[in-house]
Image (cartoon, grey):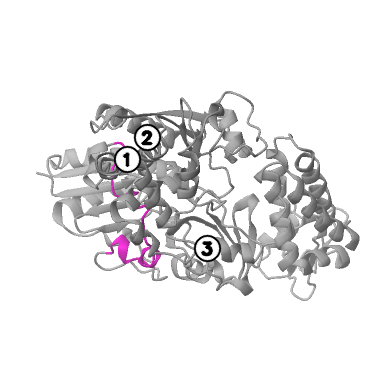
Amino acid sequence: MIRTHVLICGGTGCTSSGSKAIQEAFRDAIEKNGLSEEIKIVQTGCFGLCALGPVVIIHPDGTFYSRVTANDVPEIVSEHLLKGRIVERLVYNDTGSDEPVEGNVSLNDTAFYKTQNRVVLRNCGVINPENIDEYIAMDGYAALGKVLTEMTPEEVIKVITDSGLRGRGGGGFPTGRKWALTAPNKAPQKYVVCNADEGDPGAFMDRSVLEGDPHTVIEAMAIAGYAIGATEGYVYVRAEYPIAVARLQIAIEQAREYGLLGKNIFNSGFDFDLHIRLGAGAFVCGEETALMTSIEGNRGEPRPRPPYPAVKGLYQSPTVENNVETFANVPQIILRGAEWFASMGTEKSKGTKVFALGGKIKHTGLVEIPMGTTLREIIEDIGGGIPNGKKFKAAQTGGPSGGCIPASLIDTPVDYDNLIAIGCMMGSGGLIVMDEDTCMVDMAKFFLEFTVDESCGKCTPCRVGTKRLLEKLDKITKGNGTLKDIDELEELCYYIKNNSLCGLGQTAPNPVLSTLKFFRDEYIAHVVDKKCPAGVCKDLLQFTIDAEKCKGCTKCARNCPVGAISGAVKQPHVIHQDKCIKCGACLANCNFGAIKKG
């Protein structure tokens, strides 16, 4: 009889940190100690606290072990599983103290989890994503059964509409309305498409859902198929996500075997099946019409709209397209009701939102919070604040399509309308935190470099306009810009936004516009003072030595890769600016604080 479950994170982050070796070590140690009949090892999806991986949770007591290695496993098995003694040195400590935690710490007791409300992520880190029985045990496929045996398609659409669910891919279009627009259109074949082409730098929400709970997306797509009259669906997922692809394929095969995909599901007469299509990593294929063009076997380029996919989508047939997170909400809405979902969030932004929290933040990982939670709560209460005593400067939402929220607006409630009001956007859910050492001009340049590389080139405003933007930003960061360049930069941003064919070009200028709005003084400093206030832009940097603090130890000179530092032993040294490559080796090696960067 199984008395204890050992849950080991099998998400991409923990897998890259060695969680597979930990699983093998647990199997070996459990067998060696004769516990195979009592202890069950469960490979799960992401727990959320990615910075602490590999993560191991012991149930039923819920002990949360972090940063576990294969070498730690024999001790956990012999002490905790065999003798009932918690290995305190491995228990996660969120108090900030270096001292080991005494006793048991549960994942739900951590500051990271206390204020979260996990709807989309409800099964991630809880079940084995490769075992359909574990999903069914968590009410899996009950929503599909309810829909097919108790509800009409119109009733399904009404529930989704009344819930207030909006698309989580970035646009925020009402999901029920999208389904309602597609359902009446007559065609021999209709389609349901899941957008899992998550390409924003720093975003890994959808990938983690597919890795940790693939059946919830399958169930939701079948529900959508019933609602609009479609019998076929496609999940478009990046080939760079091999774990997500493998688990999704396993889940689809299991669902077919159980009769939950295929012909006559639940003896209702409804047929629905799914296919996987792999994306090659083109960011533009996150745009729905480019994605559908790619599924059809063509180059992934956006189409002019109208006609919209509800009328002519995949293979010129009526199509509903939603992203992974949107679909993951659907089964719970069907089971628990529209009012339950609408009770969370704000008036116009219902439910919860999953964010991939990254950058200069103590607790990086996945968080799911009710819409309307303030940025301060996300960063300070859940994320643990900025490390190393640095100050919060800004948060970038929506990746290359989004904008930045400055420290002065840290109490902004995070939802669709509030972010748009300050010139930002929700995007798919990437949230990158920046501290005082971040150059906002360089940050805008980074995202624009990404956009230039990812533009499909179909329309001139995006293909040429973003390159001209990047050229001007490059000019400014090298100290060659003028005030006129700043004005032209802004003018060009609005031209690109208003004339580009698809969402990629229409949103590409957002990082530039938002940094110009909130951090224009940094642009002016680069242009007028020829200085980078954050000390990031290499061409504007200058390393100097304070003669009063320099002890003449020669360490800086010895570590300079280009011999740019001279001086006698026990005498102040000098950096020769004509030779300096601004690598920072001198600053890193000075023990007396004599090197200044500015």
The part of the image, by quadrant, that contains residue 145 is top left
Q: Are marks 2 and 1 in contact (CB under 8 Å)?
A: yes
Q: Between marks 2 and 1, how big is the CA–CA gap?
A: 7 Å
Q: Amino acid at mark 2?
A: Arg
| Residue underneath mark 1 | 129
| Badge 1 element | loop
Q: State whether residue 47 is above or below residue 27.
A: below
Q: Which mark is residue 415?
A: 3
**In this orientation, which residue lies closer to the viewer: 367 or 547?**
367
Q: Nearer the viewer, mark 3 or mark 1?
A: 3
Q: Are marks 3 and 1 in contact (CB under 8 Å)?
A: no
Horizontal and vertical percent position of residue 96: 42, 70
Residue at 44% over, 48% down: 325
Magenta residues? 105-130
Q: Amino acid at mark 1?
A: Pro
The magenta stretch spans residue 365? no
| Badge 3 element | loop
Quick one: label 2 or label 1, which is nearer the N terminus?
1
Q: Between marks 3 and 1, how big is the CA–CA gap?
A: 30 Å
Q: Nearer the viewer, mark 3 or mark 2?
A: 3
- Residue furthest to the top in view is 297
Horizontal and vertical percent position of residue 578: 88, 55
Q: Which mark is residue 247?
A: 2
The magenta stretch spans residue 124? yes
